Image: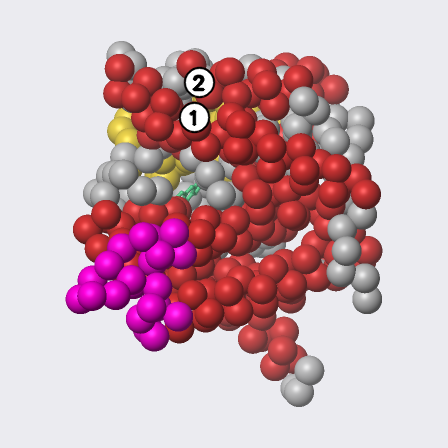
Amino acid sequence: MDFAFDARTEELRAKLLAFMDEYVYPAEAVAEEQRAALASPWDTPAVVEELKAEARRQGLWNLFLPDSEYGAGLTNLQYAPLAEITGRSPQLAPTALNCAAPDTGNMEVLTQFGDERQKKQWLQPLLAGEIRSAFAMTEPEVASSDATNITTYIEKDGDEYVVTGRKWYISGAMNPDCKIFIVMGKTDPDGDDLRRQQSMVLVPRDTPGVTVKRAMRVFGYEDHSHGGHAEVVFDHARVPASNLIGEEGGGFAIAQARLGPGRIHHCMRLIGMAERAIELMCRRAVSRTAFGKALAQQGVVHNWIADARVTVEQLRLLVLKTAWLMDTVGNRGAHTEIQSIKIATPRAVVDIIDRAIQLHGAGGVSQDFPLAELYAGARTLMIADGPDEVHQRSLARRELKKYL
Ligand SMILES: Cc1cc2nc3c(=O)[nH]c(=O)nc-3n(C[C@H](O)[C@H](O)[C@H](O)COP(=O)(O)OP(=O)(O)OC[C@H]3O[C@@H](n4cnc5c(N)ncnc54)[C@H](O)[C@@H]3O)c2cc1C
């Protein structure tokens, strides 16, 4: 087993680490300041566009896309350590590199399932970072972790589809640059096969009948840096029938294909978030004194730091193994590992960030450190992209099958 990164990965890592130091970390405070002065907090701060231009100039662009016709052509194993680095500044770095969710998943869907017209109209501007996109599946009225529950109706009417339904927590949709929604709904709600009832259609934001109603909050706050998480109403929104992605009834399968890479990307970034939390924890521990000694001299702090390091090393190995499996045997062959990392990583990283917050005292929950935002991001990943229990259920069932 060779644990070394290959030459291309090392070269990109060095470039990206320098980019983070020179451009991204200094831009964190600038982005906050600029956002406060914007007419709407959902607009994109100028510094983000500057970061995008610089990243593109340096060739740090679309690294997530394994298809070299459209992106960098990296394997999952090559991309994993790069995504980890971007996770250290999750509000800025993934966007700067055009590697942010949900655009990444949407671009993957369009490269794999989009036709030439759809690619030209929506994929090209997304690849160029000119627009943003959203993925609209979850609905407030039904338990949406079970996609067969979705009620949004996509009704065929001549050469159009009419989309009617209500979605929420649609990430990115508050950002006015988000011009296109991939909407999951049912074209055949009474069909016998529960997994063939769903389809996906492209619905432009400016379609009559589409209303971005409000920003849903996360722990009581609005998530400005990610374009928010919107409630979106589709009230008889009409789109050309050619906006269907793939085939009618193919929505479920596309959703499955979309989520494999998306989940591993989240886990890679989560490890970067944990690394940032450990770094902050150590810096704080050596710089604060309480009851006559540095926090770094307290045994309990040693335990926190050591446990965090051990956990991160374990998680990284599992994520890299999963990436390698996805590259060698495909997403299906890596099913158990993808679920394992999706279950293991957010909860362990939440715990590490929680300790880092504790060590910072009030500062830990303040806006002066990134920890509170990191915590919210990691905690919500125990729900988003499928709650932990759903992955546990499916993993356990596969495990039990061996004994039935
Ligand atoms: C910050 C954030 C961003 C999001 N972004 C998007 C987005 O961009 N697009 C989008 O479509 N959705 C998005 N979501 C929604 C997310 O994907 C859903 O919340 C998630 O799939 C769960 O669906 P639900 O909220 O309807 O919960 P439900 O399906 O109602 O489930 C609630 C709880 O029930 C339990 N549960 C469910 N099934 C089982 C089971 N089989 N066994 C045991 N327990 C179970 C779990 O604890 C689960 O958390 C986002 C959510 C958040 C918080």
Please check the rendered image and state whether residue 283 is part of the magenta-colored stretch, yes or no. yes
State whether the magenta stretch is mostly helix, strand or loop: helix
| Residue kind at label 2, given as amino acid type | Val
In the rendering, at what x and y percent does residue 17 appear? 60, 37
Is ligand 1 less than 8 Å from the beta carbon at label 2?
no
| Label 1 C-beta lies within 8 Å of the nearest ligand 1 atom | no
Place residue 221 in its image quadrant.
top left
Relative side of 5 to 150, left or right: right
Q: Quadrant of the N terminus?
A: bottom right
For the C terminus, give its image quadrant.
Answer: bottom right
Q: Is residue 140 left or right of residue 106?
A: left
Residue beneath disc 1: 27
Q: Identify the residue at image location x=82%, y=56%.
A: 328
- Front residue of 287/385: it is 287
> In this rendering, would 75 be left or right of 122?
right
Image depth: mark 2 or mark 1 in front? 1
The answer to whether residue 165 is visible is no
Label 2 neighbourhood size at 10 Å, few (<14), some (14-19), many (20+)? many
Residue denoted by label 2: 47
**What's the magenta region?**
281-302
How far is mark 2 from mark 1, CA to CA?
A: 7 Å
Residue closer to the observer: 240 or 54: 54
Residue type at mark 1? Ala
**Mark 1: secondary structure:** helix
For the point 66% across and 48% down, which residue is it? 80
Q: Earlier in the sequence, mark 2 or mark 1?
A: 1
Tell me the SS state at disc 2: helix
Query: In the rendering, at what x and y percent does residue 300 appear?
Result: 33, 73
Q: Residue 18 falls in which quadrant of the image?
A: top right
Residue 320 marker: none
